[in-house]
Image (cartoon, grey):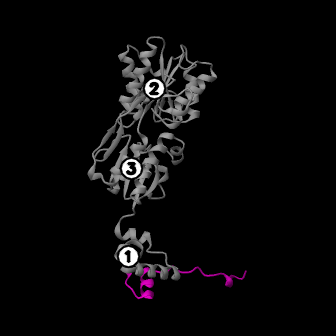
Amino acid sequence: MNKNDKKTPKKRMTLKAVAEALGVSTATISNAFNRPDQLSANLRDHILKECERLGYNGPNPAARSLRTGATGIVGVMLAERLAYNFRDGCATEFLQGVSEVLDDARTNMLLMPGRDDFYHLQSMESIPDRYIVYGPPRDISVIERLERQQKPVVTVDFSLKNHLSLNVDNYGGAKQAANHVLKQIGSQGPVAVIGLRLIQSDIIGRIRETELLDAGVSISRQRLEAYRDAAADHGMQIPEELIWNTHESNWADGVKAAREALSAIPRPRALLCMSDQLAMAALSVARDMSISVPDQLRIVGFDDIPEARRSHPGITTVYQPSIEKGRLAAMMVLNPERFESRVLPTQLHVRETA
């Protein structure tokens, strides 16, 4: 093809040019797209048909956001990489709840990873009008970026000074689960913990006490303290050599940690798992090692995701209202003046594994 035969891209018509072509004001054109109640039905239909003929698709949303300072977008910052949240049942339920409220409010959502390396060459944190921060980001500098925006922020599963927070009763739920198991096994044997991000490191294995994250920023640490307090109430201890860390709430991490834990001597009589994914992985390991559940081993999880309810045997677990938590977080960020920080209750759901 001769280079002279190439078509020159058609220049996008401006709002002003369209208004001049139709002999109306720019406000009338804008109202036809954004405020139809300001025009008669006949006039709006006429303007929209003429705009279509001219190849004009409406006012530029980027230009509008520059003028008004609003984008109509809620940023949802996730503690981990984006892909992880679509593999984790608790996170997907939370995002479902957020989406339901934002859909009804005709508001868009921007998913944002909570890792600083995603922000070095871009400033996506400046796009949203407000933010939900789901779990403490791995890099504190990301929070500092949000704070500089001086926009509404709602934190979920942790608290941030001068901002609304939404949490569940992690300590109470975990202690209820531990007490339930400890009453059953008495002094028959040790209890081990399959933890989730108890330390900053990505290792899968036993923890060292000095590495534990602070309970103020780690819901897993809150659950661990509840397990230990329950054990103390029963005259027992859960020492660091019986606490395993996993990096993610997934099958592979859970299998590795559970296999190590169930190979310990003496073998634990119960596994307190900090997520249902980890509990289901532990159940699979127990089957492979011919350990009868619940006769020889009791297992409890946390979250009550749908897979835990469908598992056989069913997973005894702590229910947290993940979908409702998502809905409430979205309502709080859209209308922060109507809400105060909240702690939602949890509930132990007893099934076959304990």
Say whether disc 3 or disc 2 marks the residue closer to the N-terminus: 3
Q: Nearer the viewer, residue 232 or 174?
A: 174
Image coords of residue 240 (percent x, y): 45, 22
Identify residue for label 3: 132
Residue type at numbered disc 2: Val
Is the residue under label 2 in contact with that under label 3 (CB below 8 Å)?
no
Q: Is residue 257 above or below residue 140?
A: above
Q: Nearer the viewer, mark 3 or mark 2?
A: 2
Is label 2 in a helix, a strand or a loop?
Answer: loop
Query: Which residue has dot 1 on it?
Result: 31
Gap in angstroms between the C-alphas marked 1 and 3 = 32 Å
Tell me which residue sits at (34%, 68%) in the image. Answer: 68
Q: Quadrant of the N terminus?
A: bottom right
> Taking 354 as reference, is 325 left or right?
left
Label 3, label 2: how far apart the Cα atoms are = 32 Å
Report x, y in % for residue 46: 45, 82
**Magenta residues, as a range?**
1-26
Which three-letter amino acid code belongs to the residue tagged 3? Answer: Ile
Residue bearing the label numbered 2: 350
